[in-house]
């Protein structure tokens, strides 16, 4: 079986990718500096090297071990922080990715799946967002993802190299078999914040904005289960190795769910009321972000298995039971 190097494989999405690769029979090696990734998320069936992507020597040492393909998820992802400290994001997300790409070229590794984001589009000019929508990121995080996509595009033209950039919409949930338990520290995203309120880790939370032009006044997003995201990575590796082409693909469900619907669904799942209030809009939040999700289905021959938001939330709540 092909050998896949998962850079950032101890993180939230990375660990789910590792699980799917192992289940698909791939020889899997994790490279992670454990800065946000967690040791509890490592699978004993996969190899592990602790290292940082800014360390070119450490990267070369793993890349030279007959690696067939790379999955790169070692990005910083806090949008607010990227606006306060763009240097950190330039260094880690852009320089770190250049190191990975150069190490791949120098070691003859020809295929990469890159963890990109819907943040590359910026404020939607039309909906749903298809892959042809102009790229106009409104935060430095999104800019860093766009830059790496563009670098990979050039490398694919100039070298024996192909890539698939997966533009994630809102990743949620945990593996249903509870094999991954490491919760993100200091979560910035809606569902982990709601879960902290549900478990008493925080007193409550705020819904940012109730006067958007949406049916219930709260923002609409496209929530996709992390195990579905993960299986798309395995399909992407398969595709890269069987065809010379490169792709940029949305990973979403195409279904819009409101913040209020997420809150109500969580209350149903946990069987109790949550403590929340309505607050002002969060700057930079578009009213609606939803994917046109057909291209990934076609190119990867893949479908998201989870469509019901309560079922998705249950995969998180089950970790508490
Ligand atoms: C997230 C990611 C972004 C990614 C995008 C893809 C972060 C911070 N943002 O954006 O990088 O590109 O998905 O679509 O990782 N909300 C509340 N209260 C809270 C937290 C959030 O009401 O305490 C609301 C937000 O206003 C938003 C929705 O919940 O409407 C989702 O927010 P969040 O989980 O932060 O994700 P996005 O901002 O959609």
Image (spheres, rainbow, N blue to C red):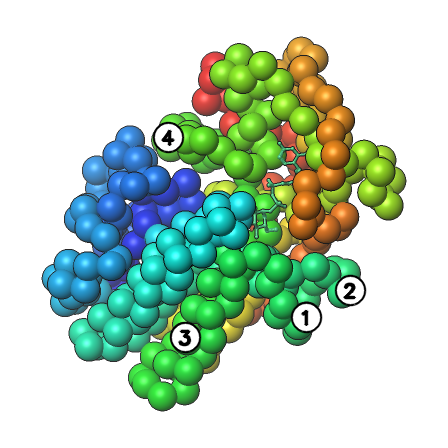
In this picture, is 259 found above or below 57? above
Q: Secondary structure at mark 3?
A: helix
Task: Specify the quadrant of the image occupied by residue 109.
Answer: bottom left
Residue 110: percent from left, percent from top: 30, 75
Q: Residues within 10 Å of mark 1 (few under 14, many from 20)?
A: some
Dot 3 or dot 1: first in sequence order is 1
The residue beneath circle 3 is: 152
Dot 2 or dot 1: first in sequence order is 2
Q: Which mark is residue 126?
A: 2
Labelled pair 2, 1 in contact (Cβ < 8 Å): yes
Please give the count of numbered marks on the rendered protein: 4
The residue beneath circle 4 is: 182
Mark 4 or mark 2: which is in front? 2
Q: Residue furthest front?
A: 84
Question: Residue at point 29% right, 31% down?
Answer: 40
Residue 18: percent from left, percent from top: 33, 47
Q: Is residue 82 left or right of residue 282?
A: left
Task: Specify the quadrant of the image occupied by residue 198.
Answer: top right
Q: Quadrant of ligand 1?
A: top right
Q: Secondary structure at mark 1?
A: loop
Question: Residue at point 37% right, 81% down?
Answer: 155
The residue beneath circle 1 is: 133
Dot 3 or dot 4: first in sequence order is 3
Question: Residue at point 21% right, 38% down?
Answer: 44
Q: CA distance from mark 4 to mark 2?
A: 37 Å
């Amino acid at each position: 079986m092909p050998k896949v190097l998962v850079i950032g494989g101890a993180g939230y999405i990375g660990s789910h990718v590792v699980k799917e690769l192992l289940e698909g029979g791939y020889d899997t090696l994790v490279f992670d500096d454990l800065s946000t990734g967690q040791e509890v998320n490592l699978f004993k069936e996969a190899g592990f090297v602790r290292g940082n992507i800014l360390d070119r020597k450490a990267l070369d040492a793993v890349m030279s071990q007959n690696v067939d393909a790379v999955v790169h998820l070692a990005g910083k992802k806090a949008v607010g922080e990227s606006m306060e400290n763009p240097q950190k994001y330039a260094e880690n997300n852009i320089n770190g990715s250049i190191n990975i790409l150069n190490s791949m070229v120098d070691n003859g590794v020809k295929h990469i799946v890159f963890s990109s984001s819907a943040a590359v589009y910026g404020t939607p000019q039309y909906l749903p967002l298809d892959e042809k929508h102009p790229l106009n990121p409104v935060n430095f995080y999104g800019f860093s993802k766009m830059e790496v996509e563009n670098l990979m595009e050039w490398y694919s033209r100039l070298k024996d190299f192909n890539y698939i950039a997966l533009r994630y919409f809102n990743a949620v949930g945990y593996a249903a078999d509870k094999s991954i338990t490491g919760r993100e520290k200091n979560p910035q995203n809606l569902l982990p914040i709601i879960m902290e309120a549900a478990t008493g880790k925080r007193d409550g939370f705020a819904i940012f904005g109730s006067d958007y032009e949406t049916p219930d006044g709260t923002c609409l997003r496209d929530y996709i289960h992390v195990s579905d995201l993960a299986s798309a990575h395995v399909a992407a590796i398969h595709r890269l190795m069987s065809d010379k082409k490169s792709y940029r693909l949305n990973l979403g469900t195409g279904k819009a769910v409101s913040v209020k619907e997420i809150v109500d669904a969580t209350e149903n799942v946990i069987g109790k009321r949550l403590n929340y209030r309505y607050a002002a809009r969060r700057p930079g939040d578009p009213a609606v972000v939803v994917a046109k999700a057909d291209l990934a289905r076609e190119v990867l021959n893949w479908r998201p298995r989870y469509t019901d938001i309560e079922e998705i939330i249950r995969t998180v709540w089950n970790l508490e039971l």
